[in-house]
Image (cartoon, grey):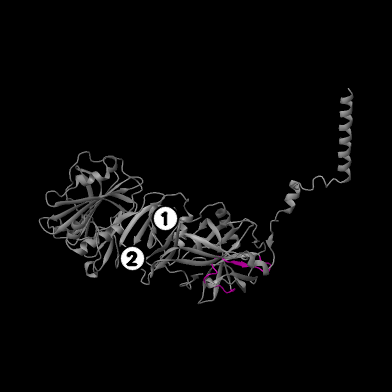
Amino acid sequence: MYTLRRSRRIWSILALSILCIALIAPGSLYAGAPPSLEQRGSQATPTPGPIDNLEDVQKAVVRIEAVGVFRDPSEGMTAGAGSGTGFIIDPEGHVVTNNHVVTGAAYLKVYVEGKKDPVNARIVGVSECADLAVIDLQGRNYPYLAWYEGPIRVGLDVYAAGFPLGDPEYTLTRGIISKARADGRRAWASVEGVIEHDANINPGNSGGPLVTTNGQVVGVNYSYSRATEQFHAIGRDSALEIIEELLEGKDVDSIGVNGEAFVTQDGKLSGIWVSSVASGSLADQAGVLPGDIILSMENLPLATDGTMATYCDILRSRRANAVTAIEVLRLDTGEVLAGQLNGRPLQVSVTLGATPDSSQSSGQPSGGQTSPAATYDEFVRVSDAQGILAFDAPAAWKDVQEAAWNFNDETVGIRLDVAPDLDNFYDDWGIPGAILRYSDVLPGQMAVEDLLDEYTLHNSCTQGEREAITVGQLAGAYQFWRECGGGETTGVIVALAPSETNAYFVLLELYGVEERDFNAWDALLNSLTVTPPVASCNGRGAKSHRRCNQQGRPALRPRRCKRPRVQLRRRREPGGQRAAADRI
């Protein structure tokens, strides 16, 4: 008991001593311990607020180098780095710039004020039509610019900040808003809500901010016209709508190309020149390559006015995952390819314009380059009376007649024959020409390729190759026939149907003797349009399989629209042409 009482007394004394020490010097006992969570938070680097003065704008403006391989129309494939400007919009390091600065680059080098080495960055989202992009810098706690919240009126003092001409030295130029809403259609974008100003900008200012005297962003610089000394920025309101989606990782009104619209001086060729393609993009998946020219989308010709307006109107009217028909000219091979975004990859659509010898030697119906003398001088537009079939044919094939398409003694559609002399065309293999047929009855009875077995020339010609073919939104197959009538005439039978619906069949018989006839085939197929009648047939049609005869040709002349060759006509803007603008 004594021992127990003594132990209790000792422990009581020790406890009292510890309590006294704690009361006298509370900090000394825990002098080496880490601070509390609240204390640690107070010592962290504070998140910076937005820049609120013109002098500090430089801290949030960055120089961007886009490194990659690009295709130049005159120089071919070139490896190098393009230079542009951007500006930071939040502490997390999101940067706004132009799409044409970053799209197609292999990687980006971003130079930030106060950092010796470039900062790595990744692309978050782009918009080709709005010419905007958002990239994300590595790191956090960046100084950033805020958006101007006041009205953007003519006469507002503004400053253009950036790195023009690739110069690493920051520049700032002064001006005023000269027009609150300007035309935003350009060769590389079609922007809605553009501001015109006179603060001088140059190539390299692309993507840089246009700011107020308080350093707040009014717009994103993207274009200039040196001839008129007019400079343009994407306005705040239009930019913010797009940027919000880009920050979510979405691409807006884009297929993944860094492209530029063009039209030749004579208006015969227009399209979107592709200088680079983003890996994994819709264009990449479809098979578009740098150096391609996008001729049309949804069968509408592009850039006939020298701008991206039609291209962007199509993209803005469709969902990002919508299947969209696309046609491309590949200059490297001289081929026209057709396919779909979000659908069928690009395939050679028309290469039938080949001499018999060249086709036989290669095993493919692909034509090489021909001299100007191997073409007809004039083409005309031909269609049936209902306007179902329409195409370009040589003016020399002046004899045109329309009849019914009879299959197994039953009418299943329409037929249109064209040749220099139809009276002798059916008996003389030496006369070139074409027979086109349309039916919305036969698809319920057979596959489109079966038509090639129904319509044969075994008795008169030597059978050649059979291959698949795509013509715009139509797909099917063709069969070559050679040495027809024991001479040099070549024939090809082409069976086509809409690739998506198979709603109707188009059957073409094409006959030629010389090089210009074969090139006329290409002109006909490239210009072929099919417009089904509003009311379709009731589904009744032929049941047996026999080749139809060539009888019944009423003297019914189709409508003609005369024009010199196949060409895309340049559309003039109301009030004359606009002054040319350049991207910066």
- 20 and 547: which is toward the camera: 20
Residue 529 in sight here: no
- The percent position of residue 106, horizontal first and vertical second, equals 47, 59
Contact between marks 2 and 1 (CB within 8 A): the answer is no
Q: Which residues are magenta?
A: 198-215
Is 354 included in the stretch rendered in magenta?
no
- The percent position of residue 170, horizontal first and vertical second, equals 60, 71
Residue at horizontal 13%, vertical 55%? 484
Q: Secondary structure at mark 2?
A: loop
Is 199 included in the stretch rendered in magenta?
yes
The quadrant in which the N terminus is found is top right
Q: Is residue 444 left or right of residue 208?
A: left
In which quarter of the view is residue 329 placed? bottom left
Q: Is residue 13 left or right of residue 361?
A: right
Q: Amino acid at mark 1?
A: Ala
Residue behind mark 2: 567
